[in-house]
Image (cartoon, grey):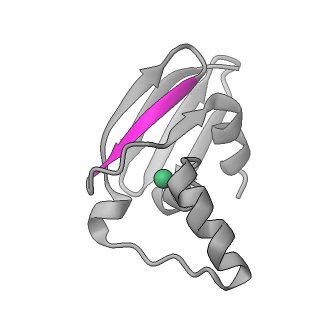
Amino acid sequence: MIPTQIKVVYNNLLIKWNDNSKSEIKLANLRRNCPCSVCAAERDMQGDKYIPLYTEDQLKIKSISAVGNYAVGIVWADDHNTGIYDFGFLKKISYL
Ligand SMILES: [Zn+2]
């Protein structure tokens, strides 16, 4: 499945898929599940006690760009830009 449209509306990422379904992902969820190795390591280290606290900039998207034909790269307003979100992953976290 691939997105036909991705946009940020208020605190959500709205995705339209090519099967006409839609996903809505809270930006906080998107950031909390950032798949980059730095964030994954941090989550691993803190385990169950991990309570993510974010500044406003960390929950604001500066830009979104296509990565090949399988993912999008997100640049956050705090310049964190190493998270590559593949489409299946976006679909999955939209249910969280
Ligand atoms: Zn990250």
Is residue 75 shown left or right of residue 37?
A: left
Tell me residue 91's x, y (percent): 69, 38
Is residue 57 shown left or right of residue 42?
A: left
Identify which residue is drawn at 56% across, 28% down: 16
Asked if the stretch drawn in magenta spans residue 26, the answer is no
Q: Is residue 90 above or below residue 20?
A: below
Tell me residue 81's x, y (percent): 37, 43
- The segment highlighted magenta reads 71-76
92 or 24, which is in the foreground? 92
5 or 58, which is in the foreground? 58
Identify which residue is drawn at 26% across, 53% down: 77
Quadrant the N terminus occupies: top right
Identify which residue is drawn at 48% across, 21% down: 67
Tell me residue 42's x, y (percent): 57, 67
Q: Is residue 26 visible?
A: no
Q: Is residue 54 above or below residue 3?
A: below
Q: Is residue 36 visible?
A: yes
Q: Residue furthest bottom?
A: 49
Quadrant the C terminus occupies: bottom right
Q: Residue furthest top?
A: 69
Identify which residue is drawn at 63% across, 40% down: 90
48 or 69, which is in the foreground? 48
Tell me residue 10's x, y (percent): 36, 54
Is residue 61 shown left or right of residue 23?
A: left
Q: Is residue 83 above or below residue 78?
A: above
Is residue 19 shown left or right of residue 74?
A: right
31 or 48, which is in the foreground? 48
Q: Is residue 41 above or below residue 2?
A: below
Q: How many marks?
A: 0
